[in-house]
Structures are given as structure tokens and as C-alpha cells.
Amino acid sequence: MPRQPRPPATAIAVERATLSNGLRVVLAPDRSSPTVFVGAYYDVGFRSEPQGRAGFAHLFEHLMFQGSATLEKGLHDRLTTGNGGINNGSTRNDFTNYFELMPSNALEVALFLEADRMREIRLTPENLQNQIDVVKEEIRVNVHNQPYGGFPWLYLPMTLFETFPNAHDAYGDFADLDAATIEEVAEFFDRYYAPGNCVLTVAGDFDVTEAMQHVERHFGGIAAREVPPTVDAREPLPGRERRDARRDPHAPQPALAIGYRIPDPIRAFDEYAATVLCCQLLTGGEASRLHQRLLKTDRIASHVDGDVGLVAGTFEVRDPSMLQVQVFYPDGQGPDRILRAIDEEIERIAEGVDAAELDRFRNAYLADYLGGVDSLMQRGMLLAALEQQRGRAELLNELPGILTRIQPEDVAKVAAQWLTSDNRAVLELLPGAAG
Amino acid sequence: MKPLPSHVPSVGPARPIRVPTAAERKLRNGLRVLAIRRPTVPRVEIRLRMPAGLIHDGGQAARAWMLPETILTGTRSRSSVDIAQELQGLGAGLEAAADADDLVVSVGCLSASLERMLDLMAEVVTAPTFPADEVDVARDRVVQELIIGRSQPSVIARETWRAQLFGRHGYGRPMPAPETIARTGPAQIRRFHAERVLPRGSTLVLVGDIRPEQAVEAAAEAFRGWKGRPVTGATPAPTMSAPESILLVDRPGAVQTNIRLAGAALPRGHKDYFALTLANLVFGGYFSSRLVTNIRETKGYTYSPGSAVDHRRGASALVVGADVGTEVTAAALLEIRYELGRMAALEVDPDELDAARRYLAGVTSLSIQTQAGLAGYVDTLISCGLSLDYLRTFQPALQRITTHQILEISRKYLGPGKLLTVLVGDAGAIRAQAEAFGPVEVRNAP
């Protein structure tokens, strides 16, 4: 038997309940700091958007801050910040989340705020137009006016995938945004913002019994509604390499992104975990294969990094997910040498992985992971996504053990079977305006 | 400001921020060590701060710029790969970064590795060899990073306001030119390291799943051999000036204008620091501020407007920023100046001031929830001469500030005439808009 050392891990208590209206609740008490996280995760994301309304899920997220059942615009934020907290929301492939991070004396306020907008949102035509304008400026600041804006997170999926749920412009086309109406907003809310389509997570400094009483008081009266089916965005493997090139008028240097199709994050979790470690071997810092090869040995690139996941994080996404590598390199050379070097390094991994090397990368990854879940915000978010997509919030504590089970041959197998040229997309970024 | 609706649940008193107890020792070589127990996860966060930042280098500060890029690349007994692999084995991440004043080496690692980590850290920080091939690789990388960094409109805007506000003082210096980096070799970096990376004036903070006394002892043992004192001499404070004319940096084709207004502010520890901090919050320092409510939530001109105080050891600056659609550049500038003027001319509502006080107290609690957050917070406190006791005293100090004090401090620091204005955008589209506000000087983007 290969040795399986007991990895460092957390032992965060996880309790759960379901209200009669279908709302699932996850509670993870930790009284070490007088702070609390409240997150509402709705099972609706980019993949739920209708054709012709690219960017609608994200626009809708903004509208959830524009007024709710009993609060006019601005009060949600004032009640958060004025009680010493912060809030935000984000839209990802499979979910849209809303959260408050507060001093723990304000727990009930945070629960009230999430319940008030789950009950109803209030939206005027002026506020809809205001947020369409704000979202356009968000897209300009992050994409249109920004060197390397949207590269590769927005554009690589468009090349790797083929079907609308996976391959459309998730931030949104301006024409689609402008076309949004109050009626569509109301329909979207009715369809996707039912209590049964939400996981509510509370993490941090609270008493479980008391917190559940607050949850019942504020959410219990919200009527149950039909829950939409979970989006199945699976699509066939590409079968051949897909390639694309985009010009970036603001970028001074070229860049290259490669996205590989990978095992199902949920149905094939052990293989997926092996993929995560394979990605570490390839791109996890200074000791990684691609850093050594591209920056040190061949000296043909100035930066390389990689990750598993889409816009959503590694363990917060349903199938299909992606392993991506991005490389920045000096102008004047094409990407072919870089691609060849990457192929060679993947082949070397496919031929076999040294157990000591895998242990080192795993150790570094686990240490990083623990640093992440030290943050109540990251912890609460991961708990919510794990519960929503897998019904297993406890995986937060179990992930280190699962990663420790992965053997060198598992990693080699992923490289051989999945990280092949006919299973990937290659996206080139060409600097400067078209000549 | 409208009162809050009465059906909102009431909020009891906040659990007070617990001031952590620290084990502390000043080593014989001058290094100050401070360790705090916070066993939330089996990790420890370490911050080593040394007075070897950009201001301590001459010319374009290329040596100080390259120091953090090369300091972890080798020692007499370890290559860069050895170091990287050893860090993985310890479950550690190690980073070095230089700011205007200091070089900061940050570590997060499994707490079981603490002693070996401290030994490795002491070795790489105090006895780097700067191998020529490693410096060469790092230079190539940094040149590319600088080229890419300078293409970012937010970086162009930041470099421009700093140069305008701090003038010829080191705080106003731009990032080094790629050609200068290309000329900076191991010998120069090594000399700068020898002059500045020294224990006296340096601090080491440890926070995590540790026994503080033992951690201090381990640190004392690891850094015992570190010797020397840097040539002292306080950095002269810059004379800050806010020229009246608007500086427009042309970025043809830009679909947004990066608006920045900047002026002098007060350092932490100054008697009026809290008044200015609260005034800044009410004005533009958080989401429920006047500026965000106006130009984002009412007018829709921008996604992420805000106002913040940028602290260095010898100077603090107040910076207002908004990236706005090209077509609304003048309209947004008008509203920014209006909100500044309102702060300087009229007393704020007592409810607005109370909300800002509660926000600041609350987010302080939030920011020290993690080991990394607490380590960073403590490191910042002691780097500006404050003690952990600040966590106890700041809330009563906030409580004492009156709306009249907010008005007085706003007159001095937030009046629109006190701040300089920089615009980065498409001059062809925004020059005429800007000229409505006064003389405009146009420059090309670097």
C-alpha cells in the first residue's frame, strides 16, 4: 500500500436544515472572531440565460440591490455598511450569489435583508436603466478599456465550447443589455429566485439554535414556488483542436491561452481531483514543469499560470469544467514553440509522475487551500456551492483527505487521456490594432 | 438623510474587538519580533518588513525594484529550484514585494513547519547570492511586466497623479524604464541588499496556530546571525502641491476616462487623522458614501468610484478615482467637485457620521478575522509606530469626532481647490469637455 499520511485539515462543524418552502440552510458556527457570513446562493448563472439575453443573469444580480419587498433602493447597502459590514454579489456559470459579511451582532439584519429580497424585488424603469449603465461601465473598465481585458476568462470558453450555455458572452452584449425589460426581470425572478432554488449559508460567530430561529422568522413565510430543473450544460468533447485569435488594441505584448476539457467535476470527482493536482504540477508556481521549462530552460515566455475551473472556482462548477493555461511572451515569436514545449511537458507527465514530486505539489496546494478557508467569506462561499451542487457542504473538511488519496498514476492518466491536442482550444491574443 | 425603517431588526452591542496578546522581543541585532496566537487553521502567517523600499534607492530605483524579484533565487547552498521545492515540502508560500518605503517578505505556511520555515526564510533573506543566470531570467520577466503594467490605464493614472503631487521627491518617481532594468545586474542588486537589508529597523510579525513565546524564540534563533545597521537619516517629507491646470494624458481610442483627483492627507497617528478618515468615508470611502450614491447609483456614470487615503512613511495622499464613460467625463468631474465642495461647505448629517463610524469599526473586525488579515494589520500598525492597543483606542477616538470637526477638516483637505486633477482618456473626445473646468495640459501616454 502506498503511504497515505493524514493531511492537515479543518474540522468545521456543518449543520443543515430545510424549511417547508424548500429553502436549504447550511450552518457552520465558528466563534473565534466576532464576525459572521450570510450567503444566499441561487441556482441560476450564465448557463441559465436565454439566447438573445447574454449577460442577463449578471445584470439581474445588480437589480437585486435596487430595492426589495419593504426596502427602497439604497437601504440594503446602508443597512449593511451602517452596521459595520460589507456586501456584494457575483454571477458565475452555475450560480448567482449574494452575501453579507458583518459583525456578529448584526446577523439578524443580514438574514432580514436576504429574506426581504427573496420575497420580492422592487424595480423602477429608472433604476433598471441606471444599472444597465453601471453594468456597461463595469464591462468597459474590465474588458473594453483594459489591456488583456476578458483574456482568457471571457473568451477562452467561447473557443473551447460550442453550445450557447457554455460559449456565449457571459458579461453581455450591449444590445442585449439595452433590450432588457421590467417584465423580463419579473419573469426571471419568478422562475429562478424561488426559496427552493436557494441555499442559504451562515458561517461564523452565532448560536445554531438562535440562528435557525432567525432564519425561520424571516424566511419561513416566503411562499414556496416551483423550482426550475438544474441546467444540464454537458456537451460532446471537441474531437479536434479548436483555434481562435483575437486582437487586443490596448495590449503591448502577445499572449496565449489553452483550455482543455476535463473530467466531470461531480460525477467523476476523483479524476477531477487528479486533474487539479496535474494542473499544479504543470503551473503551480516556481517549481512547476511549465515555469521551469518556459521561463527558465527555454526562456521563451515571461509568465505562465494555470487553473482548473471556469469563471467559477475549481470546486464551484458543474460539468463541463476546464483546465486552462495562459502564457505571456515577448512579441516577435509565434506561439508554436510554446505549444510544443507544453505538449512535451504534458507527455512527460503522462509517462509517469514521481511520488515525491506529487507529494510536494499536493502539500503546497493543501496549505493554500487551508489559507483560503481561514477566511469566513471564502469558507461560506465554498460551503454554499458544495451544498448546492453536491449536497455535501462537509466536503470543505474532506477535500484534503480526498486529494491525499490521489496517486501518481491517477495524475499521469489524466494527462494521457484528457490533456491532448484534440481535446483543447488554443486562443491567441494579438497585440495592437489590426494592421 | 432619511431615517431607517422601523421594521428592521434591531442590532445589539457588537462583541468588542479582542486585542490580541503578543509575545514580543527586540533581538540584540535590532530586529523586532512579535508573535500572536490565532489557531483558526493549522497555519502561520509571517511578515518581515525591512526599510529597503524604492525611496531608499537613487535614480529610477531599479535596484530596489529588482531586489524582491531576485532575493528568493538562490543562496550558497540552495538553487532557486531547491528553494521552491523546499517551500512546497513545508506547505509554504513565500513572496517578496517592495513598496515606496519597505521591502516586505510574506510567508504563509503550515504551522508544523514553522521552525524550518524561519531557518529557510533567514537564509534566503539575509544571504542571497543573486546568481547571474537567475537575475538574467528575472530581468527579462520584469521588463515584460513593466511593458504590460504601463499599458494599464489605472497604472498610467496612478503614476501621473503621484508625479504631479510629489514632484521631484522619490515618492513621485515613476516605475523604472525597461532599459534601466535591463542594465541592472547582480552586482548592483547585491550592493543595495548589503546597504539596506539589515536587522535594525526591521520587524517580524507571526500570527497563527503557534505558541507565541516559542515562535519568538525560534525566530530569535533563526535570525541570530543577521548583522548590521542601515545608514539612517530620515527621508525628507515631500512638498505636496496641487497644480490648478488639469493634466490630460492622451490614450487614443479609450472608451473611458480615468479621473483622479489627489491632494495631501494626514498620516496615521496625527491628532486629526480620525476626523479626516471619517470625512473621507462620508465623501467617497465606501459604498454608501455620497460620491458612490451620486455618480454610480443615481447617474450611472461609473462602476467603481471611490476615494481613499494612500499612506507612505513620509506623506499621505487623498485620492479620488472614477473610471467613467468618455461621453460623461465632464458631467462626472462636475459631480465629483460638487460632492467635494459640499463636504467643505456644509456640515454632514449626524446619521451619516454615525454610519461611517460603525462601518469603520465593523470592517476593522472583518479585516482581522483571518490569520493573514491580522498579520497584515499588525504589521501595518507597528510599521507606522502604533501599538496593538490601537485596536482598543480607535473606537472611542472615532466616537469623539463631531460634525463640526468633519467640516473643519474637509475645508482643509477636501475642498475641490485643494486637489489636483488628472484625466487619462481619449484627448480628441474629452479635451473640450475638460477645458470647461480650467486650463488643460495634454500629454501623450508613455
Image (spheres, coloured by chain):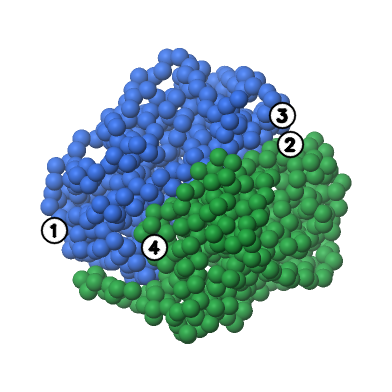
Question: Disc 4 designates what residue?
Answer: B293
Chain shaded green: B
The mark closer to the camera, 3 or 4, is: 4
> What's the CA distance linking mark 4 and mark 2?
44 Å
The mark closer to the camera, 3 or 2, is: 2
Q: Please, what is the three-letter code of the amino acid marked with disc 2?
A: Asp
Residue B163 in which image quadrant: bottom right
Mark 3 near mark 2, Cβ–Cβ under 8 Å?
yes
Q: Please, what is the three-letter code of the amino acid marked with disc 3?
A: Arg
Whether residue B14 sits left or right of residue B150 in the image: it is: left
Rendered residue at 50%/66% (across/down)? B337
In the picture shown, does residue A217 fall above or below A190?
A: below
In the picture shown, does residue A402 fall above or below B406?
A: above
- Label number found at residue B140: 2
Q: Which chain letter goes with mark 2?
A: B
Q: Please, what is the three-letter code of the amino acid marked with disc 4?
A: Thr
The mark closer to the camera, 4 or 1, is: 4
Label 3: element kind: loop
Q: Which chain letter goes with mark 3?
A: A
The mark closer to the camera, 4 or 2, is: 4
Question: Disc 1 designates what residue?
Answer: A221
Residue A49 in view in this figure? yes
Horizontal and vertical percent for residue B6? 22, 74
Label 1: element kind: loop
Chain shaded blue: A
Question: Disc 3 designates what residue?
Answer: A299
